[in-house]
Amino acid sequence: MTPVWRAAQTTVDFRDLCHSNWEFPEWIPNVGSWQFLSRREAEKYLPQEATSPPFTVLREGITEDGAPHRLSRYVVSVH
């Protein structure tokens, strides 16, 4: 098994030396660079639809009427 463990360690060493988890470190989110938006400013980033598409939830062993449901769009507010 020694050759297998040596090959695995060589692979790990190579990846540590030549690869990075973050190819673009400037893209890493940083809380310090966030800016809060007013509700009006945030509107352009929210979906235009006020409700979700209709959907149903089916669970094994539970019988329901199967009527479609919709969810309303929500807005998070900071107090």
Image (cartoon, grey):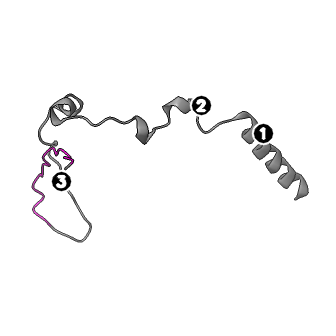
Q: Secondary structure at mark 3?
A: loop
The structure residue drawn at horizontal position 9% and vertical position 55%, both measured from the top left corner, is 67
Q: Does the magenta stretch mainly form a helix, a strand or a loop?
A: loop
Give the mark toward the camera: 2 or 3. 2
Q: CA distance from mark 1 to mark 2?
A: 16 Å
Indicate the amino acid at tag 1: Phe
**Residue at the spot of label 2:** 23
**Residue at the spot of label 1:** 14
Give residue 4's position: percent from left, percent from top: 84, 53
Give residue 57's position: percent from left, percent from top: 21, 57
Q: Secondary structure at mark 2?
A: loop
The structure residue drawn at horizontal position 37% and vertical position 36%, both measured from the top left corner, is 34
Give the mark toward the camera: 1 or 2. 2
Indicate the amino acid at tag 3: Thr
> In the rendering, which numbered label is found on residue 56?
3
User: Is 17 on the left-hand or right-hand side of 62?
Assistant: right
User: Is 44 on the left-hand or right-hand side of 69?
Assistant: right
CB under 8 Å between callouts 1 and 3?
no
Report crowding for label 2: few under 14, some 14 to 19, many 20 or more residues within 10 A (C-alpha). few
CB under 8 Å between callouts 1 and 2?
no
